[in-house]
Image (cartoon, rainbow, N blue to C red):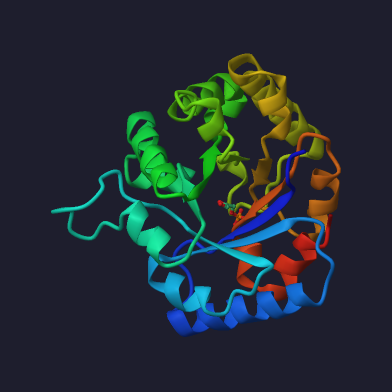
Amino acid sequence: MRKNIVAGNWKMNTTVSEGVKLATEVNEALNGVDAKCEVIICVPFTHLTSCKAVCGEKLHLGAENCADHTKGAYTGEVSASMVASTGADYVILGHSERRAYYGETVEMLAEKTKLALENNLKVIFCIGEVLEEREAGKQNEVVKAQLESVFSLSAEDFGKIVLAYEPVWAIGTGKTATDEQAEEIHAYIRSLIAEKYGDQVADDTTILYGGSCKPSNAKGLFAKPNVDGGLIGGASLDAESFMGIVTAF
Ligand code: 13P
């Protein structure tokens, strides 16, 4: 059976001390509830080691990106093995902000995914269309093309991928996809996985929704059969609102 997951994506927010405070608050709150999902915080590279120190057994840690090379003369880059060496066990790849602002392509993301998996990191792989594509009814086509980065993996490796559908028009805009819009495209994504890897793998794949997810709309989204949790931006920067989403399951 697939796992339900709520993952925070802090993006480029918080200093190290603010981040440690937030991680500590989330960890403490999590210890006080019987969460029905796995909980992950994905934090800036600079925060990984100190956040790891305050994550208890219930709180998993991830990075927000990793390099598409193993090591060497790539000034400013952080490799998958460096991320793994902090004790993190997840990495977000293919976020729309990285695709849009840093030119990440399907091929680069295939390489990053391969390197992350070789270093025993689990990958939260993001896909999603922009507004013009949604308005032109092209969202299925777009997510199908983006999935090419992970569809060359073996079924075993694909089993280590969590997908996150994040419509770009819903990110940080306060405009959430309706429960029905999310369910419709999540079901389509699952059908593509079934076509490629078979029904069992499709059934076992966790597909998260991301885009203005908050405590007030999480319950409705998570109640949909193909929505297995959320990837949370803004609302993950406050322990109380993040926990409001965690406890929506
Ligand atoms: P918001 O929750 O701030 O809309 O961000 C979603 C997101 O991009 C998570 O990766």
Using the image, determine if residue 147 lies above or below residue 109: above
Number of disc labels: 0
User: Which quadrant is the C terminus positioned in?
Assistant: bottom right
Quadrant in the rendering for residue 221: top right
Q: Is residue 137 visible?
A: no
Which of 190/80 is in front?
Answer: 80
Q: Which residue corresponds to the image point at 38% horizontal and 64% vertical from the top-left?
A: 85
Q: Residue at x 66, y 53 (%)?
A: 212
Q: Name the residue furthest top.
A: 195
Left or right side of 24 for 153 = left
Identity of the residue drawn at 63% across and 57% down: 7
Residue nearest the observer in this picture, 165 or 153: 153
Q: Is residue 63 above or below residue 96?
A: below
Question: Which quadrant would the N terminus be assigned to in this image?
Answer: top right
Query: Which residue does the image show at 80% across and 39% down from the upper left?
Result: 179
Image location of residue 177, percent across then percent down? 71, 40
Of residues 204 and 95, the one nearer the viewer is 204
Residue 189 can be seen, yes or no:
yes
Q: Is residue 33 above or below residue 95?
A: below
Q: Quadrant of residue 9?
A: bottom right
Horizontal relation, residue 248 to residue 237: left or right: right
- Left or right of 243, for residue 146: left
Q: Going by the image, does 32 lie left or right of 75?
A: right
x, y (%) of residue 107?
34, 30
Where is residue 34? Give x, y as percent. Answer: 84, 67
**Residue 143's spot in the image, x, y percent?**
55, 27
Q: Is residue 18 above or below residue 173?
A: below
